[in-house]
Amino acid sequence: MQNEHILKGVKTVERRLTFKDVKAIVKLGLVQGNLIPAFAGAFIAIMLSGRSFLSSIPELLTMLFGTTLIMAGSCALNNFYDQDIDSIMPSKQNRPSVTGKVSAASILQLSFVLMFVGEILLFMINIETGIIGFLGIFGYVVLYSVWSKRHLVSNTIIGSFPGAIPPLVGYAAIEPSLSSTAWMLFVIMFIWQPAHFYALAIKRSEEYALAGIPMLPSVKGFKRTRLAMLFWVLLLLPTPFFMQELGTVFIALASVLNLGWLLLAISGFRSNVKENKWAMTMFVYSLNYLMIFFVMIVVVTLIQTI
């Protein structure tokens, strides 16, 4: 009896959630990465509208918290829906949703609670912010996870629409009437995503093929994918010039970032290129690109107001 009691205690400990488990369920890294564009969108709205930063802090904090919740909830729902294919892919087999450490019902309940509370917070700011947040949820869960991910090679492009929502949410929280600058942030983040995710898909092409997910590298191969990546990087080149209000320093720095990515994309056409190594270099550059780009927007905008 005593041994049985000890065994039950061990099993209970094993089932306890760790912070690592929670991170995996809500895809915390993805959430954190998207908070930077959301903050940048809000910050540029504050500066361009002439509002005081201190007076905007309530809306800013509410937006960041609400955005965190709806993104975490959407990612949790994605984990719930993708349990079957995640169990096939080696890189995702340790997720709590796959191992059974967290029940499917619990993940489903958590996802809806997070999204519901997050949407309430966004609607408390203004209707526009709440609606944009809802469009992000709908786009990621329905258009991407349910509809396109398993059926269309263009799934990455379709998923780029909800993926570009964060700066719009941030901007709308401060200034509901979205300016051309807000829409340019959306466009830039939309264009950024295909090359970013195609790079990761090259490394995991065999996994996606095994799971039956029609990612571009798995369906069309490396040569076709590197052409697509070059195309999307080329589309980024003129974008800084549509943001003249941020000044020539910003345009110059953003152009340097774009040219660096372009040169890296072109290097993928070398005859002796190692596909996976090149793809991961592209992936890492894209992560740094996004962070530097939006931090640069905040810094440049702040300097202009001093």
Image (spheres, rainbow, N blue to C red):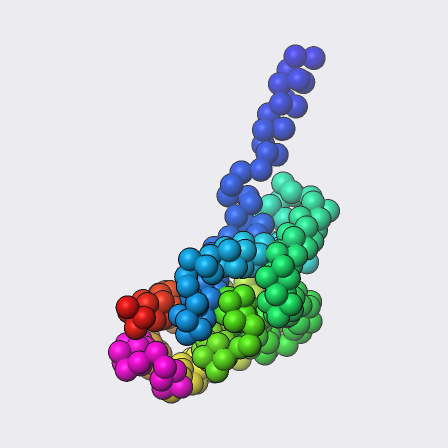
Q: Residue at x 31, y 80 (%)?
A: 247
Residue 253 is a magenta residue: yes
User: Along the line of sight, which residue is nearer the eye, 144 or 55?
Assistant: 55
Give the mark count.
0
Q: Is residue 283 above or below residue 92?
A: below
User: Along the line of sight, which residue is nearer the eye, 154 or 174?
Assistant: 174
User: Along the line of sight, which residue is nearer the eye, 61 or 151?
Assistant: 61
Give the residue at the far top of this rendering.
Answer: 2
Q: Is residue 164 visible?
A: yes
Q: Is residue 235 above or below residue 4?
A: below
Q: Residue at x 45, y 63 (%)?
A: 39
Q: Quadrant of residue 281?
A: bottom left
**x and y percentages locating residue 93 in the rendered image:** 57, 51
Q: Is residue 89 above or below residue 195?
A: above
Chief secondary structure of the magenta span?
A: helix
Image: magenta residue range: 241-257
Q: Quadrant of residue 213?
A: bottom right
**x and y percentages locating residue 255 in the rendered image:** 31, 81
**x and y percentages locating residue 94 in the rendered image:** 55, 47
Q: Is residue 37 visible?
A: no
Query: Which quarter of the image is occupied by the N terminus?
Result: top right
Q: Residue at x 54, y 55 (%)?
A: 62
**x and y percentages locating residue 44 in the rendered image:** 42, 70
